[in-house]
Image (cartoon, rainbow, N blue to C red):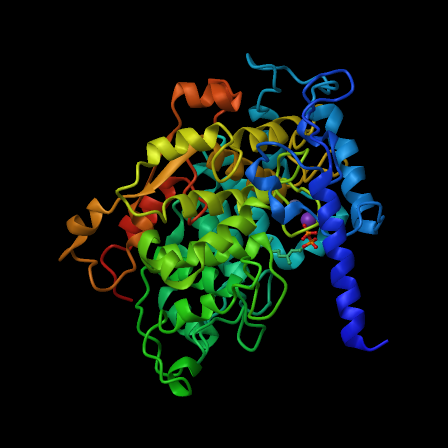
Amino acid sequence: MSSQEDGDDTLDELLKDRARIEELPDNDEDEDGRPPFPGKHLKPKRKKNLPVWMSSATLSLFHEDDQTPSTEALAKTAAECLPYLTLEDTQGLPLNSHGLPHLRRKPHADFLRSCLGDLPAPYAAMDASRPWLFYWCIAGQSFLNEDVSSYKDRLIETVRPLQNPSGGFGGGHGQYSHCACTYATILALAAVDGLEVVDRKAMWHWLGQVKQPNGGFRMAANAEQDIRGAYCALTILTLLNLPLTLPPDSPARLTGNLDLFTDDLGTWISSCQSYEGGIAGAPGNEVHGAYAFCALACLCILDAPSRSIPAYLDVPLLTRWLASMQTTPEGGFAGRPNKLVDACYSHWVGACFALLEAARPPEEDTQEQHAIALTGQGLWNKAALVRYLLTCAQQPGKKGGMRDKPSARPDGYHTCYSLSGLSAAQHRYWYDGQRETEDEGGEESGRRLLAAFRWRGERGTAEEMRGLGVDEGDVVALVHPVFVLRFEAVEGARKRFAGGGL
Ligand code: FPP
Ligand code: K
Ligand code: ZN
């Protein structure tokens, strides 16, 4: 059989299967006539009013009896989460007025605090990621409204030896500077208003070495080029108000003829969007939700979201891809198609919606859109995400902390990004175009990228909070959707370096 015929056969099979899916009866009610819990049906069956995240993107064309390691893992995860989602098992957690577990503020804050103390031996593997631990645990506490200012001196003394004379921060003593470690260090320092320890001039030089002739950024000098580098570098440049002009010895200037850190960046980000709509770490690679966040947040640093996002990305295609990352029955997000729900994607994917919702032209009524989103009919189902976080991601017992899924242990990373995702669901965000006019001609105009400082946010209305099933005590702080810090910390960095200069 020729490969051509072979291909036609496969297509016929797929189309037959698709037809079978279309013929399936409605399953709006189970045998007892009760409306089904959304997760009861792990197999693709046609549903009336298909929730948007269960739309055709999740309807598999493969034979529905096929068992693969992925289908097994998905079913296992659903089974593991269902007793908590349905509240059949509340794990002994105190419940709020809506019957959901309260957010365990104190145990989570205690957990994050304990992660900054002496750590057990297995954490030696984290030696190259120490700045991440500082950021997750300090920022995470701030999202719980804990006062983190007392960490300032200790943090400054801890990161001082990680700063290299040639610029940037390494993950540990004597390690080369790296974009991810430097990003985490800068955010942690911003959270405690401790940015004075940064050698900004050396940082500017070092970032010149990671900017590439094609417009993208490497993760470190001579390391891989990917979209995390672009987001990390733009965050560092912007919070520190470094000159946008490339240093004279930057490869981007020498071989690429580029003049600014921002030159050809939007076009490079564009090239990371795949045919599926998602964003890859680098052109041609597999797409992932965390990279979608890096792309969107980076574009939001470059300019107003309503300009920069549609200029460089296919927004409908990306929106559809992101919406398909919300999983059933769990209600949280997966990082990529056919993979498992994980609480950390509450931030990496959830914050994408906060950024995308602001990409609409300013005249569209965001208040109304927000109300729609809370009903679960919008781009994402916020109530389902909150339910996953409160029922499945909270570690019960004395320990506290938040976790990927019930079978996982809590850690600083998942605690920080679960709280940030919770914030994205509980608040609404918009870009304040009015501030563009106010900034015009001001001392920073023409130098610093000011777009990301023009974001605003506020808690949803009391009615919206009821729709999410949260009480007053379950609401976290307003987290900046671009910088993943409290707004106060972002404003502190803006003010500190408003004068510019090196
Ligand atoms: C796959 O992990 C994960 C990735 C390919 C990307 C991870 C990137 C981030 C979490 C964020 C990076 C951002 C910055 C700012 C440095 P996996 O296979 O363990 O998980 P999965 O099965 O859920 O995809
Ligand atoms: K994962
Ligand atoms: Zn995770």
Q: Position of residue 474 (x, y in %)?
A: 52, 23
Q: Can the viewer see residue 257 in this picture?
A: yes
Q: Quick check: 69 above or below 105? A: below
For image coordinates 46% across by 52% down, the residue present is 316
Q: Residue furthest top?
A: 97
Question: Which sits in the foreground, 496 or 324?
Answer: 324
**x, y percent for residue 257:** 36, 85
Q: Please say if 172 is above or below 99.
A: below
Say if 31 sits above or below 56 in the image: above
Tell me where residue 358 sits by quadrant. Answer: top left
Looking at the figure, which quarter contains the C terminus? bottom left
* Left or right position of 432 against 299: left
Seen as rendered, the residue at the extreme left is: 441
Query: Which quadrant holds the N terminus?
Result: bottom right
The reply to whether residue 481 is visible in this rendering is no
Q: Is residue 83 left or right of residue 483?
A: right
Displayed quadrant of residue 390: top right
Given residues 225 and 412, the one toward you in this image is 225
Q: Nearer the viewer, residue 321 or 416?
A: 321
Task: Give the residue at x 78% y 19%.
Answer: 31
Residue 68 position, x and y percent, is 83, 51
Q: Residue at x 81, y 38 (%)?
A: 76
**Count of labels shown?**
0
Q: x, y percentage for residue 269?
A: 46, 66
